[in-house]
Image: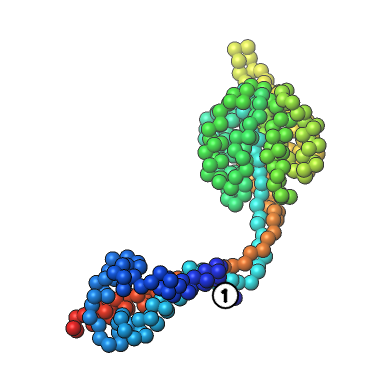
Amino acid sequence: MTGFAWPLLFLLLPLPWLVRKFAGSPAKEGGEALKIPFFRDIAGLKSRKGSVLSSSGKGRLVFLSVLWILLVCAAARPQWVGDVVPATENARNLIMAIDISGSMSMDDFELNGKYLDRLSVVKAVADSFIAGREGDRIGLVAFGTNSYLYVPLTADTDTARKMLDELEIGFAGQLTSIGDALGLSLKSMQEIPSDSKVIILLSDGTSNSGNLNVEQAINLARKMKVKIYTIGVGAYIKSIRTPFGTQKTNPSKELDEENLQKIATSTGGEYFRAYNTSELQRIYQKIDELEPSEIGSFYIRPVRELFFFPLGAALLLSMLAVLFALAEARKS
């Protein structure tokens, strides 16, 4: 189906006739109706009888009328409008709540043959996870004593990765506010009309700070139908040699696995334990298998602009008229 986007512009069709009738003929009065750099030279050329630019006869009037009609048609935006077709948008909405409290500085994770602090390994693995989220919306919440919406939900995964790389231990304080981190993550998802809303909470400690407790956060997540996947970070008990002999140490003694597991199971998610780098990678791969759900359906009507056809015809006629006039002048 074809039509015009701005059909009211056809009211301009009689404009040249009205100007000529009520404003008089500028040519007769010695004035100029419109200044065109090359038109005076063309008008001064001697042309044969019957030329479209001849001042006598109907040829000139027909030519200018056709030219004006084509220009008005182009300005009215002719369009081809297709049939209505349904469209859907599929995407995940993922908030990654990352613990950057003081305990994340413990270097009990190995990466590329070197022992690094927990946050450095988490950032490296999370970076690969975000890189594969093309088409999804990613947000970052950083928490310690306080919680901050570090990156609002965005489809710009490159920016999210850059911001993730700039996270530093202690920026949000030394304690751990898991309830506040979940509350802030849920708040950032509140206005999103989607059933595919997921929070990935990663922590190595116990919630010992904040205004919102874990129970309140769980109830809010269930009300909003948000899945929460929790990841507990920290190595298992290991033996180390000391001047006093071999002793056992537990790098994860502050990790509250019971609470993290409760958060996950109460919201339809799952709890994972990341005790080394490879296990953390495996956990992210498993979360990556979450199926996207339809977050919106709408209808579109394809539109193709056709203004270039009348505009091109007008330009072509103008060029032909100029070339014809120049050819007539050379023969004179």
Report whether residue 31 is seen: yes
Label 1 secondary element: strand
Which of the two residues, 297 or 163, is positioned nearer the viewer here? Answer: 297
Name the residue nearer the viewer: 259 or 251: 259
Q: Position of residue 72 (x, y in %)?
A: 47, 71
Please tell me how crowded label 1 is: few (under 14), some (14-19), or many (20+) other residues with Cα within 10 Å: few
Q: For this view, does 309 lie left or right of residue 253?
A: left
Residue located beneath label 1 in the image: 2
Q: Residue at x 73, y 23 (%)?
A: 208
In the rendered structure, which amino acid carries the disc numbered 1? Thr
Front-lying residue, 307 or 23: 23
> Quadrant of residue 232 in the image?
top right
Percent of width and height locating residue 309: 45, 74
Using residue 220 as the reference point, say whether residue 192 is left or right of it.
Answer: left
Q: Residue at x 23, y 77 (%)?
A: 45
Q: Does residue 303 appear to the left or right of 34 in the view shown?
A: right
Q: In the rendered view of the protein, which quadrant contains the C terminus?
A: bottom left
Q: Residue furthest bottom?
A: 49
Q: State the image quarter where residue 318 is shown.
A: bottom left
- Front position in the image: 36 or 222: 36
> What residue appears at the point 57 percent right and 75 percent down from the top-left corner?
2
Residue 176 percent location from the top left of the image: 68, 25
Q: How many marks?
A: 1
Q: Is residue 84 above or below residue 119?
A: below
In the image, residue 104 sits, relative to residue 279, either above or below, namely: above
Q: Is residue 131 visible?
A: no
Q: What colour scheme governs how the chains and residues are painted in the rendered image of this protein?
A: rainbow
